[in-house]
Amino acid sequence: MEEAPVFAPNIKPNMTKEPFIILLVLFVLFGLMYSPIKKTNLSDKNNTTNSSSIAAKKENIGYSNNKEVAKEIKSTEDTIKRLEKDLDKAIEASKRSPYHGKLNLSRISGLNRTDPNKEYVSISTRLAKNETIKITGWYFKSEVTGYYAIIGGATMLPFPFTKNDNNIVLQNGDKVYITKGFSPIGISFRTNKCTGYFEENRTFTPSLSKKCPLPKDENLPTFSSVMDRNDECLKTIDRISRCTTKGNEFVRDLPDTISSSCKTYITTQINYNTCVANHFDDTDFPDKEYRVYLNKFGPLWRTTHDTINLHDENGLIVDTISY
C-alpha cells in the first residue's frame, strides 16, 4: 500500500488576539528606537551626530564581515585548487609505468619530412648494472590522433632480408632508434661490429656507425711467394677503407703484377659475411644499438601540437614527448 501523504494541520488563527499582538510589537519597537535618546539627553544636533556614528559603525561592521567572508572564500578556493593539483598528480602517478625514468625518449626527428624512413625517435636507457627491460610489445600512442604503433622484435645477428626476430631486451647504455618507415635491409636488427657494411649503397637514418675492422688488420694470408708481389697486394689492401667492399671493376684496374689470389681475396673476403665469421666470438662484437622499423607510411601523429606516449605492456606510460 502507498503511504498516505502528510499534510499540515488546519489551524485557524485567533482573530481577537491579533490586533493586541501587533500593537505590542509596535510599542516594543518604538521603545527600542527611542530608549538611547532618553538615556543620553543629547541635543538634536548630538542626536544627528550619534545617528551618523551608528550608521558608520554599522557600515564598518558590515565591511569587516564582508572582508572576513571574502578571505574565507579565497582560502577555500586555494584549498580546492591544491586538492585538484594533488588529485591530478595522483591520477598521473596511477598511469605511470614502473619503468618511468629508466627509459627516456628523444624528440622526434624528421617530423616534417615526407619520407617515413627519415622520421625516427630514440630510446635511451638508465638501468642498474644487471637490470634488463623487454620492450617488445610496447607501443607509441598519440593523444591527439589516437593512432598507435607497436614495437616488434629484432634480429640479433642480421643478414639482409633474413628475418629471425627475437625480443628486444635492453641493458644499461643500450639505445634504440625507432623509425616510422621501412628498413633498408628489410628487417629490424641489433647492430654489431660489422653492420657498417650495410651502409654501402644504402641509406640509414641516422647513419650506421662504421666500426668494421680495417681489411689490413685482418689475419691476411700470403698472396704470392714472390715477396715484392705479396707486398704490392698488401699495399693495395691498405688503401681499402673500413666497411667497404670492392667489386670486379676495382680489380680490373689493378696492375697485372697483383696476383690473382690477391684479387680474389679482395672481391670475396672483404665483406660483411666474412667480417661476421672472423669476429663473431669477439667480446665487443655485439653493439649496444638497435634499429627498429614500424613499417608505417601514413600519419601516426601530428607534425605540430601533439603528445606522444610510450606505453609498456600493461598500457602504463613510460615516457612522453610533447611538442
Image (cartoon, rainbow, N blue to C red):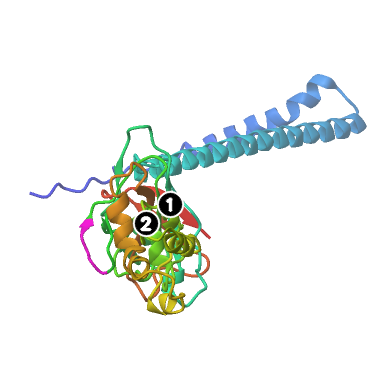
Determine if residue 239 is in view.
yes
Please name the residue shown 22% across and 64% down the image.
Answer: 163
Q: Going by the picture, which residue comes out furthest to the top?
A: 39
Asked if residue 101 is positioned above or below residue 141 in the image, the reply reads above
Q: Are marks 2 and 1 in contact (CB under 8 Å)?
A: no
Please name the residue shown 35% across and 46% down the image.
Answer: 95
Amino acid residing under circle 2 = Cys
Determine if residue 15 is in view.
no
Label 1 crowd (10 A; few <14 / some 14-19 / many >=20): few
* Residue carrying label 1: 217
N-term-proximal mark, 2 vs 1? 2
Image spot of residue 252 (x, y percent): 42, 79
Asked if residue 279 is positioned above or below residue 306 in the image, the reply reads above
Query: Which range of residues does the magenta coloring cover?
Result: 161-165
Asked which secondary structure carries label 1, the reply is: helix
Please name the residue shown 79% across and 20% down the image.
Answer: 39
Camera-side mark, 2 or 1? 1
Tag shown at residue 194: 2
- Does 36 sit left or right of 234 as displayed? right
- Does 246 sit left or right of 18 as displayed? left
Given residues 293 and 209, the one toward you in this image is: 209
